[in-house]
Image (spheres, helix red, strand yellow):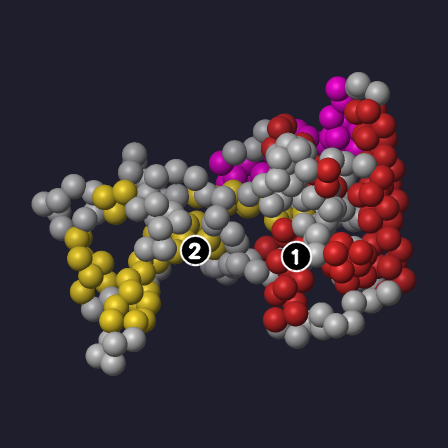
Amino acid sequence: MFYLSHDPRDFDSAKMTGTLYRQAGWYENGEWVPDPNREPEVVPLDSGKVEIKLETMDDNHFTNPKDVYDHRTAGAAYVAIPLRASIIEKEVITKEDGTTETVKSEPKSLTSVADGSDVIANAWIGVKGDTDLNGNCNAVDASYVLIYAARLGAGDTTTLNEVADVNVTGVIETATGLGVTRANADIVEDFAYFLSDTNGESSDHGASDADGNLKAAAAALNAVDAANQLVWSAKAGANGSANWATEVMVSDLEAGTLPRHTRGIYEWEVANGVVTPETPAE
């Protein structure tokens, strides 16, 4: 799962796949009591009966990308880290006055049916617009995007990592050394593409945008992405930082076409008083 380094929201478990089994049983005082005499039942991840919580496996127990990135090893340009998955049981109960209430259990470790090991999710966290994975978004990244788009348009089969001269082997070794369970050249390529695709945030190398729209125009790397990288670089260079939604992608904000991650971050910022929706920067 790919994330932006400035995302303060909880890690998203929506893209986790697989089958969730729960030992059949009953609720008692808000806790699930398993019945060993009954067969396990399948609980769909989107059933509303459970909630998956993701957090780092260290003593910090960070639950969002921004905290992880802000506390990364000094000099690290990106973070690739395993996350532990916990499950929270949910039950809707009817109170004496006839109203309903959702009762949640305490988080419990989510374990594999196969071997009882903890279920691990891999998080790749980087700077939006950082094509060459060096921790910065600047004119160099924009030039790589333009070169890649031109070569792709000419029928070249080059990869984005090749164009940006990314040390793919080094990225993989760093990730696996930190405990990431899946790290290969394709994932590193998709990660760099995700960070570079400023207006689509595609996690599948352009097959679809972050909202799941297949063959979306925004999912293609092109001059629009390069222009956004240049605008962000200029504003961040002048002010120390820049807001992607309100200062860089203003036209997308006004048109309601911000990509999923940037849109979600903007909505969080509005809800928490970081920005005001009425006055996007010019």
Q: Furthest-bottom residue in view?
A: 97
Residue positioned 66% across, 33% down in the render: 215
Judging depth in this view, the residue of 58 and 194 nearest the camera is: 194
From the image, tell me which residue sits under label 2: 53
Residue 279 against residue 237 in the figure, above or below? below
| Discs 2, 1 touching: Cβ within 8 Å | no
The disc label shown at residue 214, or none: none
- Would residue 133 be visible to someone looking at this image? no
Residue 157 against residue 265 in the figure, above or below? above
Sequence-first tag of 2 and 1 = 2
Q: Is residue 55 magenta?
A: no
- Magenta part of the protein: which range? 157-181
Image quarter of the N terminus: top right
Indicate the secondary structure of the residue bearing disc 1: helix
Q: Residues within 10 Å of mark 2 (few under 14, many from 20)?
A: many
Q: Furthest-left residue in view?
A: 37
166 lies left or right of 26: right
The amino acid sitting under disc 1 is Arg
Residue positioned 49% across, 44% down in the render: 15
Residue 216 x/y as whole percent: 68, 37
Residue 250 x/y as whole percent: 80, 59
Residue positioned 74% across, 26% down in the render: 159
36 lies left or right of 130: left
Image quarter of the C terminus: bottom right
For the residues marked 2 and 1, what is the alpha-carbon distance in whole angstroms? 22 Å
The number of callouts visible is 2
Q: Is residue 172 magenta?
A: yes
Indicate the secondary structure of the residue bearing disc 2: strand
248 lies left or right of 191: right
Which callout, 2 or 1, points to the residue nearer the camera? 1
Residue 145 against residue 8 in the figure, above or below? above
From the image, tell me which residue sits under label 1: 263
